[in-house]
Image (cartoon, rainbow, N blue to C red):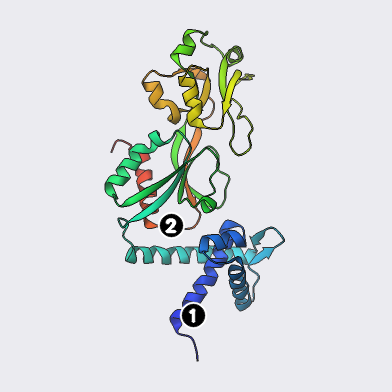
Amino acid sequence: MSQPIGTKVNQELIKQRCFVQAVLTGGISSAARVLGLTPSAVSKNIMRLEGELGVQLLARDNRNIVATERGEHAFDAWMELLARLDQVQQSLTTSVNSVGTIGLSLPSGLLQWLSPLIIRYKAEYPNIQLRLNISDAYSDLVRDRNDIAIRLGRLSDSNERAVSLGTTPLIVCASPAYLARADIPATPESLMEHDGLMFRLPDSGRLRPIMLPGECNAWRAAASTDSGQSLVQGALAGLGFIQAPLILVEADLAAGRLVEVLASHRPAALEVSLVFQANSWLPSQARAFIDMAKLWRRAPNL
């Protein structure tokens, strides 16, 4: 007895989703976590798909998988079809204002900067709860179960899509109390005569170099921290200079609690990005947040 058409279609979609997700995440186990299946089930579905087509879609070794040339063509086609199917299903069955949760990862200290967008989103979608994960460590969206993340600087994960929220300058600043007892530096090189705080990269433990033109070797490190928020607090307490993204300290600069120095020696600005998984199977609540973020950065006072 043959299977109903609906059952056959659903089985084909599962096999295609397994293949697409394996390419997106670069592995069987990571695809299984996203899809809620076992690695064995994902692997078998992909092998069945290859067997039915008579085509090798993935090249495998002990550690990695990559799409073959034919697999890349199949990936592009199925990615588009599955994304469109999910969008249609979501528009028919899901209300963005239904009760739900969005996982949002952002660096420490950026909550104040992002709060106008969060307030606007909550006003429009009061039933959606934001699960905020505040950390300066790199957040793997799949591993940490986050829908969206705010990232500063260059992006390197090809499994993620990004929406630019603009750029932010890197500035050198200190408190008025510190500047009152020290000479204001006239050149980047003169910073070597001053005290300051260093940012310690949470993922590696290395100190992030101070980025300034010339041959500046930065300041005498009074302390180091792996928290951007603590870096700012140290500067406010008068411990010395810091280099930080402007969006982290703009409120303190406006209030006069911190003072920028060497403004004419700013390095290249950092990109500010909103990132999400490189598939289109996001909850409608997360999609609404992304769309609102795009409008917010173009016209933040709306």
Q: Is residue 64 visible?
A: yes
Sequence-first disc among 1 and 2: 1
The answer to whether residue 160 is above or below residue 240 is below
User: Which quarter of the figure has residue 65?
Assistant: bottom right
- Which residue is more in the foreground, 267 or 256? 256
Q: Is residue 212 visible?
A: no
Residue 180 x/y as whole percent: 47, 8
Looking at the rendered structure, the kind of residue marked 1 is: Lys
Please name the residue shown 37% across and 22% down the image.
Answer: 254
- Which residue is more in the foreground, 64 or 72? 64
- Which residue is more in the foreground, 206 or 150? 206
Residue 250 x/y as whole percent: 41, 26
Looking at the rendered structure, the kind of residue marked 2 is: Leu
The answer to whether residue 168 is above or below residue 39 is above
Please name the residue shown 51% across and 75% down the image.
Answer: 12
Say which quadrant the C terminus sits in.
top left
Q: Contact, CB < 8 Å: mark 1 with mark 2? A: no
Instruction: State how far apart marks 1 and 2 are (Cα).
Output: 25 Å
SS for callout 1: helix
Q: Is residue 40 left or right of residue 244?
A: right
Please name the residue shown 46% across and 34% down the image.
Answer: 167
| Disc number for residue 282 | 2
Residue 230 x/y as whole percent: 49, 28
Please name the residue shown 56% across and 19% down the image.
Answer: 196
- Local packing at callout 2 (Cα closer than 10 Å; few below 14, some 14-19, many 20+) is some
The residue wearing badge 1 is 8
